[in-house]
Amino acid sequence: MGGNPIGGGAGRVEGTDLLLHELGTNASFNVGNVGDFAFDDKGRWLSYTIDARDQLGNGVQLRDLASGTVKSIDAGKALYRRLAWTDSFPAFAYLKGTIDSAATDTTWSAAAVSRVGTPTQQMISVGSSGSAALPNGMEVSPERTPRWLEQMDGIAIGLRVATPPVPKSEQLEDDDRPSLILWHSKDARLQSMQIVQENADKSFSFLATYLPATQKVVQLTDDVVRTGTLGARDRYVLGTDNQAYERQSSYDGVQRRDLYLIDARTGTRVLVKKELRGTSSLSPDGKAVLFWDDGNFHAYDVATKAIANVTAGAPVSFIDTEDDHNVDRPSTNIVGWSKDGRFALISDNYDVWRIGMAGKSWTNLTVNGRATRTRYARVINTDPRERNIDLAKPVYMAAMQALTKKEAIVRIDPAKAGAVAITGWRDARHAPMKARDAELWVSSIQTSTRFPDYWRVSFGNGAIADSTRLSEANPNLNGVAWSAGSRLVSYVTEKGDSLQGALYLPAGYEAGKKYPTLVFIYELQSDALNSFYSPNFSSSPNALIGVHNSRGYAVFLPDIVYKINDPGMSAVWSVVPAVKAAIKTGIVDSANVGLHGHSWGGYQTAFLIGQTNIFKSAVAGAPLTDMVSMYSSVYWNSGSTNQGIFQSSQGRFKGNFLDNKDAYERNSPNRFADKVKTPLIILHDDKDGAVDFNQGITFYNTLRQLDKDVILLEYVGENHGLAQLKNRKDYDLRLMEYWDSYLKGEKAPEWLAKGIPRLKLEEHLREQKKKLEGKKIAM
């Protein structure tokens, strides 16, 4: 759907001009006051809403693109919103809103048109003027786009509780309204989260179906089962209820919910699994619900209500042993379903297996993934009309060799074992797309030195046989001193894990010459070996790879894996051996290595410099520095507590800091502040909604008291990263000056050597701006 982006909502807006350009004749047509517009699947019809001033001439119109004929579908002094076609039938639906005479409320209805353009074209509607009765106390919601069900026997709509507007005489004036936020221990969601989600809560809608044959509106979700997704060709809804577990999940991070199957025509609800903690999926034929529980995938038979363990006894495990979070036996990924619904395709992190829903049916479709460490990761959809995988036709996937990072597009042929790399294995990344109705492929192709432009490609003899460039999206890179490429560095951690890192070479690289090197850390990053990083002003280290390469720096991205209860020490055990391995390549100047991380990478940076002196200088952006105080703070951007993040996500701690005090303290950077010898810049902003500003300022004050070499950069009003361009420019210039001073031996500017008094800051900022205007860098 296109048109005015505001027009998709329920607010009063004015349409804009829609310009239609006919490619065959170069003729152009202007349609005025258009709100929403959408083409049907075959490109024969264009439907659009008219949204004019004072609602004069508003309506829904249909244009026959073959003849140019325009027909009115609906018209009136009303608002028309959320227009959408079905995927494969000539039918569409929309919302119609009527404002009351006092202009205080809008009543909505849903309308749908079928058999468009035929003599039997038909319209149905439900809501304010429809004949079907809505559930008691409910009205049609303007916040959910209506659409035809796949069987074309009804439409899916949203319902909301009908709440009359509060009379103006009863509304609190600002002067009378206390600025209270009431936090209670029994709140399932923290008040901070309710504030962040307030608009979403206000616009929440329940899922329902309207069946014109019986004139019934069937409510499918409610205050108990609030969320649900239509599936199985719109026969069922897979719904969840997490109310009994929401409070506990907020502090341990484990997502629990009761799983229900709901009949989309009757509303009949059946409990499939109590307290589900893993993934779930409904088969396209509606005969089975697949879910993860107790280390295996299980299939719920819709007809018999029996549950079968469908992976017990399989020759491989589908427990994701590579996931190092504090989660009990997480699953690998469901890749998809066979079109007939008889099989689920599930990855074991390398191969893709065809798993029968009747149990004890396991076929390895890709054959050699685990043996060759090849990850068959993603199915390439060659027909957007197909939501599932037709195993009677060739299946295309994207694959990567884990040990070399070479990638390929592969084909799995019906009744043949294994996958064939139709592009060959290349030191490049592909994002392929196939024409729906022709054997025509287009793909972006990128490497560490090649921008991901689009190419028309064809395949032959296991390789890309021909390619034609279709885009040149970034001509500004021409003439820029660019990286000479990337290298893969292998190493073994202090705990015996075999890992890799991506080393990006500086522009003008000469073999045998050593270069100052910046180490950027987060978690696993080596798969990005062949990724192109467009240069940009940013507070994110990786976004600056191209900038630093162009200025003579090598950049190294090592992988980090974690041990439970030791996130900080895990960084030490991974990063220090990684840097030593990079030094052994002869590319890295061991005397001039800098370290940079942001957010979780900032935490690891702050921790590493208290454990090792291998780095000459470091930058920690938005770092966590005290794991004890951070544990119970609020992640203000989402409103949630950090407790769940610490236990089941990045923190990887067992329990809270009271139960596990030693682990929290031994992994807190501030506990090792006296050991820091590496000069440090901290970037931390006062409005950081992810890592509280207090984490940065207290670490700065601690290091300052200990007479350490530390600078804090605070950009007033900024959040977890720098959003304003002026601040990104200023920060990146300071990074360049900082690295050049410590790693290239250039003279330190005054702000770095001595600091700037507040009364001289304005003059200093003018000088910095002039310096940036004169710099020639890859940006």
Image (spheres, helix red, strand yellow):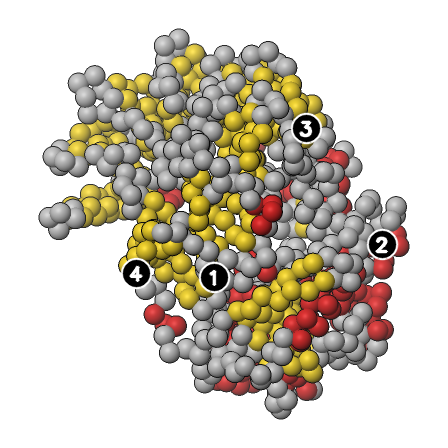
Residue 472, percent from left and from top: 32, 64
Give the structural element (helix, strand or loop) at label 4.
strand
Task: State how far apart marks 1 and 2 are (Cα).
Answer: 41 Å
Q: Nearer the viewer, residue 710 or 97?
A: 710
Kind of residue at disc 4: Arg
Q: Which residue is mark 3?
A: 313
* Mark in the foreground, 2 or 4: 4
Note whether 779 is above or below 591 in the view shown: above
Q: Given contact means CB atoms under 8 Å apart, are the residues at marks 3 and 4 in contact?
A: no
Task: State how far apart marks 3 and 4 are (Cα).
Answer: 49 Å
Task: State how far apart marks 2 and 3 are (Cα).
Answer: 38 Å
Note whether 537 is above or below 630 in the view shown: below
Disc 4 crowd, CA 10 A, few/some/many (<14, 14-19, 20+):
few
Q: Which residue is mark 1?
A: 427
* Mark in the foreground, 3 or 4: 3
Q: Earlier in the sequence, mark 3 or mark 4?
A: 3
Note whether 490 is above or below 681 in the view shown: above
Residue 174, percent from left and from top: 59, 45
Q: Quadrant of residue 195?
A: top right
Viewport quadrant of the C terminus: bottom left
Q: Which residue is mark 2?
A: 663
Q: Which residue is mark 4?
A: 469
Task: State how far apart marks 1 and 4 are (Cα).
Answer: 18 Å
Give the structural element (helix, strand or loop) at label 1.
loop
